[in-house]
Image (cartoon, helix red, strand yellow):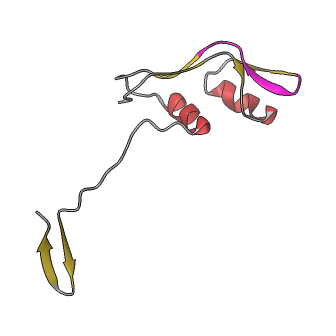
Amino acid sequence: MPSESVVYPPGPLPFPPSMLDQLRKLGMIVEIEDSQLLLREPFVGAEEGVALNPEQARVLTHFGKKLASFEIELMCHWTDGKFKSLR
């Protein structure tokens, strides 16, 4: 679940006009004006605490927005035939 809400406001988008159909398929209301993609209505990319649908996840990927972190805590390891606990 997203830890924050993400809403893209209307205005120019940082994508080439060739992405028009792709963004429309994802639910964004976009048009081409003066050779630039414009978002005509706000688009909700994520709502805090609400599971993402596939279209929202793809839009967030296009914008490079990451809503999750991944961490690993090393608890033990095996080296040269010996086990060592790190706790």
Which quadrant holds the N terminus?
A: top left
User: Which span of residues is magenta-colored?
Assistant: 34-42
**Height in image: 83 above or below 19?**
below
Q: Quadrant of residue 77?
A: bottom left
**Residue found 54% across the figure and 33% down from its top:** 60
Q: Percent x, y for residue 21?
A: 73, 29
**Residue found 36% across the figure and 28% down from its top:** 3
Residue 38 falls within the magenta-colored stretch = yes
**Residue found 44% across the figure and 22% down from its top:** 5
Q: Percent x, y for residue 32?
A: 82, 22
**Height in image: 41 above or below 66?**
above
Q: Percent x, y for residue 28?
A: 64, 21
Q: Quadrant of residue 52?
A: top left
**Height in image: 76 above or below 14?**
below
Residue lying farthest to the bottom in this orientation: 80
Residue lying farthest to the top in this orientation: 41
Q: Is residue 30 left or right of residue 63?
A: right
Q: Is residue 1 left or right of residue 78?
A: right
Residue lying farthest to the front in this orientation: 87
Q: Quadrant of residue 41?
A: top right
**Residue found 43% across the figure and 35% down from its top:** 67
Count of numbered badges drawn on the protein? 0
Q: Percent x, y for residue 69?
A: 37, 43
Residue 3 falls within the magenta-colored stretch = no
Q: Is residue 27 left or right of residue 83?
A: right
Which quadrant holds the C terminus?
A: bottom left
